[in-house]
Image: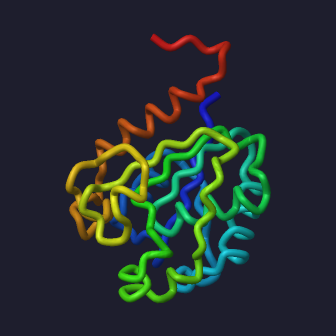
Amino acid sequence: MTPTLVIVPGLGDSGPDHWQTRWQQQFGAARVRQDDPDHPTVQGWAARLQATIDATPGDLILVGHSCGVLTIVHWAAQTGGNERVRGALLVAPTDAEAPETAALYPAVAALAPVPLAPLPFPALVVASENDPYASFARAELVSAGEAGHLNVASGHGDWPDGEVLLSEVLHAWTPPEVVRF
C-alpha cells in the first residue's frame, strides 16, 4: 500500500496556488494546520505535526517546505520519529540560523538552533542554488538549479519536477514484497 503524504507547510501555510496545496488535493494528502502559521514555535509546531501523524492512519511520507522542513527535523529530534513515518521529502529548507533570514523574517529565528542529527527515517532534501532563505552549501541536498525558493513566487505553483522526486521517495520505501518494474 502506498504511504499517505503528510504536507508540512512553512510560514503562511503554503497558499492555494502552492505546489504543497496542489499535491494535497491531487494525492489526497493529510495536512498539518498550525494554530499560528505566521509565528512558528518549536514546541507548538512539532506538537501539531505529532497530532497530525497520530490522526493519520497507515504508513506516512512527510513532505515539508521551508519552515515545514524545520518542523520535521525538530519533531524528529524531540520524539525520535515514528515507526509509521517511512521517509520525507524536504524541500527548500530555511536556515533559521542565518542573520539575513532572521532580518527578512524575524519569526523564523524562533526555530533556531536547527538540529543537525541524522533523521530516524530516509529523507531526500531538495533546494535551489539561489534560494534567498538558505545557502546551498548549508543545505546538503539535491540541486534544483537556480530556481528561487520553490514556491508560487518563483513560478512553482505546479511543480512537475517535484512530482518526479516524490515518486523517487515513494519508490525508495516500497515494501519488499512489492516488485517495481
Task: Say whether residue 166 is left or right of residue 114.
Answer: left
Residue drawn at x 38%, y 66% is: 134
Residue drawn at x 37%, y 41% is: 163
Task: Say whether residue 131 is left or right of residue 125.
Answer: left
Task: Say whether residue 83 is left or right of residue 72.
Answer: right
Q: Is residue 88 above or below residue 16?
A: above
Q: Position of residue 34 (x, y in %)?
A: 62, 75
Instruction: State the residue in front, 42 or 22.
Output: 42
Q: Is residue 142 above or below residue 21?
A: above
Q: Position of residue 7 (x, y in %)?
A: 54, 57
Q: Position of residue 27 (x, y in %)?
A: 49, 45
Residue drawn at x 66%, y 41% is: 121
Residue drawn at x 60%, y 38% is: 122
How many numbered discs sit on the rendered protein?
Answer: 0
Q: Quadrant of residue 101?
A: bottom left
Instruction: State the residue in front, 77 or 159.
Output: 77
Q: Position of residue 15 (x, y in %)?
A: 40, 71
Q: Is residue 61 above or below residue 21?
A: above
Instruction: State the residue in front, 95 or 33.
Output: 95
Q: Quadrant of residue 71?
A: bottom right
Q: Quadrant of the C terminus?
A: top left
Scheme by which the image is coloured = rainbow
Q: Quadrant of the N terminus?
A: top right
